[in-house]
């Protein structure tokens, strides 16, 4: 699956988020998602929100997906 399609799906489900997806070409993906919707949410809930945007593709078309979910403030504090 094209990483740009994963980015599009996440951005569609989490409007106004910043998304960057990388792949090793073997079905393994890494995604950085920055969104204010994560404010006050624990890591598990953040991941659930992202998985919902992918409508069951994780485990089928997407073999593995590593997530880094941050709020804009967390991104700024990390210096990235």
Image (cartoon, helix red, strand yellow):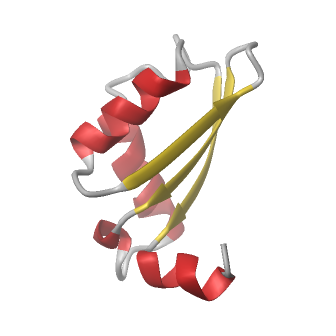
Give the answer, above or below, for where 2 lies relative to 68. Answer: above
Query: In which image quadrant can residue 56 be found?
Result: top left
In x, y percent, where is residue 46? 43, 60
Q: In this view, does 23 lie to the left or right of 73?
A: right
Give the answer, above or below, for where 53 lies relative to 70. Answer: above
Q: Is residue 14 left or right of residue 58?
A: left
In x, y percent, where is residue 67? 60, 49
In x, y percent, where is residue 19? 46, 48
Which residue is drawn at the image coordinates 73% and 15% (left, top)? 25
Which residue is drawn at the image coordinates 68% and 16% (left, top)? 27
Give the answer, above or below, for where 61 lies relative to 34. Answer: above
Which residue is drawn at the image coordinates 75% and 13% (left, top)? 26
Quadrant into which the C terminus falls = bottom right
Which residue is drawn at the image coordinates 54% and 12% (left, top)? 1
Query: In which image quadrant can residue 39 be found?
Result: bottom left
Q: Is residue 30 left or right of residue 6?
A: right
Counting labels gives: 0
């Amino acid at each position: 699956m094209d990483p740009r399609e994963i980015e599009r799906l996440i951005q569609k489900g989490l409007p106004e988020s910043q998304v960057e997806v990388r792949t090793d070409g073997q079905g393994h993906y890494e995604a950085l998602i920055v969104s204010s919707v994560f404010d006050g949410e624990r890591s598990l809930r953040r991941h659930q929100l992202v998985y919902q945007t992918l409508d069951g593709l994780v485990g089928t078309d997407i073999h593995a997906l590593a997530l880094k979910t941050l709020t804009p403030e967390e991104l700024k504090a990390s210096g990235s």
